[in-house]
Image (tube, helix red, strand yellow):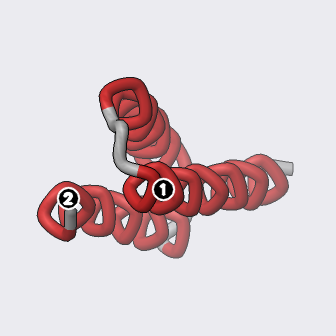
């Protein structure tokens, strides 16, 4: 399960890095991609532990999206 989430972790770090550099458009693009990847994982996963891990990342993405929307104002 760790391998499945290593790319997700790297991409989320890239989102955070882009937000810190005020590159909101690139962060938004990455956020959409990671969200789609998590949705795909959610669709095919049957393992309860994996589903819990996916939901944690989805909550984090939602939080990052809120931060980006407030940063644009």
- Marks 1 and 2 sit apart, C-alpha to C-alpha, by 21 Å
10 Å crowding of disc 1: few (<14), some (14-19), many (20+): some
Q: Is residue 4 left or right of residue 72?
A: left
10 Å crowding of disc 2: few (<14), some (14-19), many (20+): few
Which of 19 and 32 lies nearest the eye of the viewer?
A: 32
Q: Residue at x 34, y 37 (%)?
A: 45
Q: Can the viewer see residue 18 in this picture?
A: yes
Q: Secondary structure at mark 2?
A: helix
| 19 shown above or below 28 | below
Of label 1 and label 2, which has the lower sequence position? Answer: 2
Q: Residue at x 61, y 62 (%)?
A: 60
Q: Is residue 54 left or right of residue 2?
A: right
Which of label 1 and label 2 is nearer to you?
2
Q: Position of residue 59 (x, y in %)?
A: 66, 56
Q: Can the viewer see residue 29 in this picture?
A: no
Count the numbered circles shown.
2
Residue picked out by circle 2: 7
Residue picked out by circle 1: 23
Which of 46 and 25 lies nearest the eye of the viewer?
A: 46
Q: Position of residue 55 (x, y in %)?
A: 57, 52
Mark sitting on residue 70: none
Q: Position of residue 46 (x, y in %)?
A: 36, 38
């Amino acid at each position: 399960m760790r391998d499945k989430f290593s790319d997700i972790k790297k991409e989320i770090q890239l989102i955070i890095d882009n937000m810190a550099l005020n590159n909101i458009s690139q962060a938004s693009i990455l956020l959409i991609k990671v969200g789609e990847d998590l949705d795909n994982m959610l669709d095919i996963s049957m393992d309860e532990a994996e589903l819990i891990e996916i939901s944690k990342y989805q909550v984090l993405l939602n939080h990052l999206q809120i931060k980006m929307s407030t940063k644009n104002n």
